[in-house]
Image (tube, helix red, strand yellow):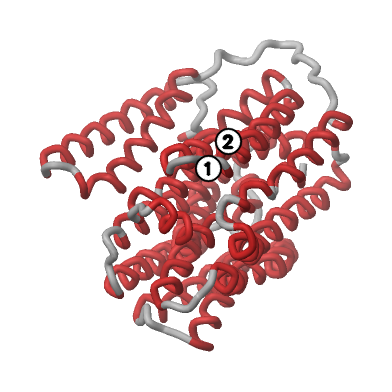
């Protein structure tokens, strides 16, 4: 489960370092290259709840084996991509297969690990994901320096092969349920990706539309599609997206908190390599080591935050971490030209704050619903995490497209700070203890 689970965060943070090299190789603008991140995050956000539901119904073994196999094949396709369009397609398929693997792996942990060791297993899984995110930037930078940007996709192949061998041996076959589940929400499963794709088109490509009328028509269409989707999900007995969960304060606060904090942190993660490249003299490896100042503290502080959430209650460590994240982004919003020790200190503080609050947020989300809905709640929580990152990638494409200078970076860091401030407000709304 750990080998399959690390693929999505590892490939997300590795490409952040390689993005300037990819842009230069294909002579692309940031807006077009931004689809490498936006398509990836869009697929991760959309597919996870759907894949989890299908795994519950049909068995998790075929989805784990199939998802891992496709991830390995499309990684090879990405390494050989002849054009940016093909690379974007391969990246999106990477995300689809990774989104199939992760929720089914989490479901298997709940199924196979005894209750008295289950929290320890999830803690180990969380540590593996944080470590993968932390290793992504320096590993990606080193690989780009030694073998070019194409080589970062080849590192997936041995990981996938090892995971496939273990999965084939260890994952049990599915035993069908005694009673058939409710009819599957095919309409919701189709409308949700269309809605997020419409938002992405509006955010990234809207500025290139031939007229304001086209932008307005697209906005009206997206709003109408959103209303139809919400109405359908409220009426379906077993919807893909569970809107009723958001009426609960704990779940709403936790999902808003993770989306807002990821908006703040992921925007900076994408912006820093481009900022350093434009300052001149920074290699991909050096940019990766700088980004490790964000991700490395997450590994340490995630474990600390989990212990504090058990001792203090859910709200306090999340609130402390959110305040730390906002405090780290405020100087960058005020002065995007910040350099030296102050710049590095901001990155360190942001990673520590992000790690400190994550365990409390996820625990609060799962505890806010009945035990039989915990898996769906976990999938939605993960989706909201990627929606925050998805909005950040749109902000990057809009604000830095066309070679915008310092003003674009300042606007981007202001967006990041606004996300962190929203995360502080969400943390304050969390219940301290499960109800």
Q: Is residue 250 left or right of residue 433?
A: left
Circle 2 packing at 10 Å, graded few (<14), some (14-19), many (20+), is many
274 sits to left or right of 148: left
In front here: 388 or 158?
158
The image quadrant of residue 223 is: top left
Residue under circle 2?
A: 48
**What residue is rendered at 54% in x and 33% in y?**
47
- Residue at horizontal 64 percent and vertical 63 percent from the top: 146
* Percent coordinates x, y for residue 329 in the rendering: 45, 74
Which residue is the site of mark 1?
383
Could you say which is closer to the camera, residue 406 or residue 119? Answer: 406
Query: Can see residue 352?
Result: no
Find residue 231 and report its image quarter.
top left
Gap between marks 2 and 1, in whole Å? Answer: 7 Å
Q: Which percent across, then down, holds residue 246?
A: 47, 42
**Secondary element at tag 2:** helix
Q: Nearer the viewer, residue 69 or 303?
A: 69
Tell me if residue 77 comes above or below residue 239 in the rendering.
below
> Where does the image place residue 150, in percent across and percent down from the top left?
57, 50
Residue, x 27% and y 67% (percent of image)?
404
Name the residue nearer the viewer: 181 or 138. Answer: 138
Q: Quadrant of the N terminus?
A: top right
Vertical placement of residue 263 versus 102, above or below: below
User: Whole-percent x and y of residue 85?
Assistant: 41, 39
The reply to whether discs 2 and 1 touch (Cβ–Cβ < 8 Å) is: yes
Residue 78 visible in the displayed image: yes
């Amino acid at each position: 489960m750990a080998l399959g689970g690390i693929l999505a965060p590892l490939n997300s943070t590795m490409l952040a370092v390689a993005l300037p090299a990819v842009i230069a190789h294909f002579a692309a603008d940031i807006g077009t290259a931004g689809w490498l991140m936006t398509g990836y995050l869009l697929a991760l956000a959309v597919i996870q709840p759907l894949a989890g539901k299908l795994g519950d119904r049909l068995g998790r073994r075929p989805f784990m084996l199939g998802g891992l196999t496709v991830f390995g094949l499309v990684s090879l396709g990405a390494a050989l991509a002849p054009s940016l369009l093909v690379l974007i397609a391969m990246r999106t398929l990477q995300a689809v297969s990774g989104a199939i693997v992760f929720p089914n792996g989490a479901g298997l942990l709940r199924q196979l690990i005894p209750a008295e060791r289950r929290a320890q297993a999830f803690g180990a899984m969380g540590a593996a994901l944080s470590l993968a995110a932390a290793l992504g930037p320096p590993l990606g930078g080193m690989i780009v320096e030694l073998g070019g940007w194409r080589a970062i996709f080849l590192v997936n192949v041995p990981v996938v092969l090892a995971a496939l061998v273990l999965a084939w041996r260890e994952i049990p076959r599915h035993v069908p349920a005694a009673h058939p589940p409710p009819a599957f929400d095919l309409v919701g499963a189709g409308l949700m990706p269309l809605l997020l794709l419409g938002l992405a088109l509006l955010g990234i490509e809207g500025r290139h539309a031939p007229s304001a009328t086209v932008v307005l028509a697209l906005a009206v269409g997206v709003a109408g599609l959103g209303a139809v989707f919400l109405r359908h999900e409220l009426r379906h007995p077993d919807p893909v997206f569970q809107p009723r969960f958001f009426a609960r304060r704990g779940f709403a606060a936790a999902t808003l908190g993770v989306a807002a904090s990821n908006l703040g942190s992921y925007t900076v993660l994408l912006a820093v390599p481009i900022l350093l490249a434009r300052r001149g003299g920074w290699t991909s490896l050096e940019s990766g080591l700088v980004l490790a100042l964000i991700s490395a503290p997450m590994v340490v502080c995630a474990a600390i935050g989990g212990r504090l959430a058990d001792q203090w209650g859910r709200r306090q460590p999340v609130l402390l971490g959110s305040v730390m994240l906002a405090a780290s982004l405020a100087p960058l919003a005020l002065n995007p030209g910040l350099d030296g020790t102050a710049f590095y200190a901001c990155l360190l503080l942001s990673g520590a704050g992000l790690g400190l609050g994550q365990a409390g947020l996820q625990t609060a989300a799962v505890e806010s619903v009945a035990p039989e809905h915990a898996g769906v709640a976990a999938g939605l929580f993960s989706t909201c995490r990627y929606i925050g990152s998805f909005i950040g990638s749109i902000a990057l494409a809009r604000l830095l497209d066309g070679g915008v200078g310092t003003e674009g970076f300042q606007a981007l860091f202001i967006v990041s700070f606004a996300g962190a401030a929203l995360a502080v407000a969400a943390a304050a709304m969390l219940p301290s203890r499960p109800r």
